[in-house]
Amino acid sequence: GQNIDQPTEMTATEGAIVQINCTYQTSGFNGLFWYQQHAGEAPTFLSYNVLDGLEEKGRFSSFLSRSKGYSYLLLKELQMKDSASYLCAVGRYSGAGSYQLTFGKGTKLSVIP
Amino acid sequence: SQTIHQWPATLVQPVGSPLSLECTVEGTSNPNLYWYRQAAGRGLQLLFYSVGIGQISSEVPQNLSASRPQDRQFILSSKKLLLSDSGFYLCAWSVGGRALEQETQYFGPGTRLLVL
């Protein structure tokens, strides 16, 4: 089975740093993805991790620990436009060889002045 | 560069009516294509995926079906809609391959369906 957990909601202040956690228990693992989804819009790709450690992309960083089944997305210098839902997704190859993503329910981040 | 289109953007349909949602990708060949549904308060649910023309795999048994009549066209259909079919339908594509960069999925703008 697939189980991916994220906090439902978070609130942070403009200019601050926020960490969004994701824990997973999945049958098969081949990569962890983070997507951003603004209200009423489609998800947009932010980052992926396949090996343990930190991947940095500008103000956004993502960390992975495969042994702990744990990842986090770190957002620095928060801006009002960062208010969105952040989706954690685990990738794996199916028995037929196709690559599939299983998504968590997302964390709704509200950035306040 | 690659772009993905979906239409219609919004749709209101009565229960029992048929459905056809279309997705097309430009700027790439032989993409992997996916249909997801996002219901209120729930995560993205994979409905169908396709690795080539005429090749469709279903993840969740239900009253929906998918077809891929052309390389870059993916269609989601239903003969009779149910109230529970309401949601945000998203099409996604990936290059496909064994590198994670090639497996990254990119989403279309989505179709918001309301069944009354």
Image: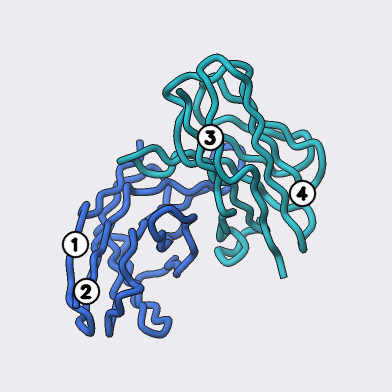
The residue labelled by disc 1 is: A10
Give the SS element for disc 4. loop
Whether labels 3 and 2 belong to a single chain: the reply is no
Q: Residue under mark 3: which chain is it in?
A: B
Kindly state the secondary structure of the residue where label 3 is placed: strand
Task: Please check whether the numbered discs 3 and 1 fall on a single chain.
Answer: no
Residue of label 4: B72
How much space separates mark 2 and mark 4, taking CA atoms?
A: 39 Å
Q: In the rendering, at what x and y percent does residue B47 appear?
A: 53, 34
Q: Where is A74 relative to A6, above or below?
A: below
Using the image as rendered, state which of residue B36 and residue A42 is in the foreground. A42
Label 2 to label 1: alpha-carbon separation: 9 Å
Q: Characterize the local packing of mark 2: few (<14), some (14-19) or many (20 or more) Cα atoms within 10 angstroms.
A: some
Q: Colour of chain B?
A: cyan
Is circle 4 on the same chain as circle 3?
yes
Is A52 displayed left or right of B63 in the figure? left
Which amino acid type is marked by label 3? Leu
* Amino acid type shown at disc 4: Arg
Number of labels in the image equals 4
- Proximity of marks 2 and 1: CB atoms separated by less than 8 Å: yes
The residue where tag 2 is placed is: A18
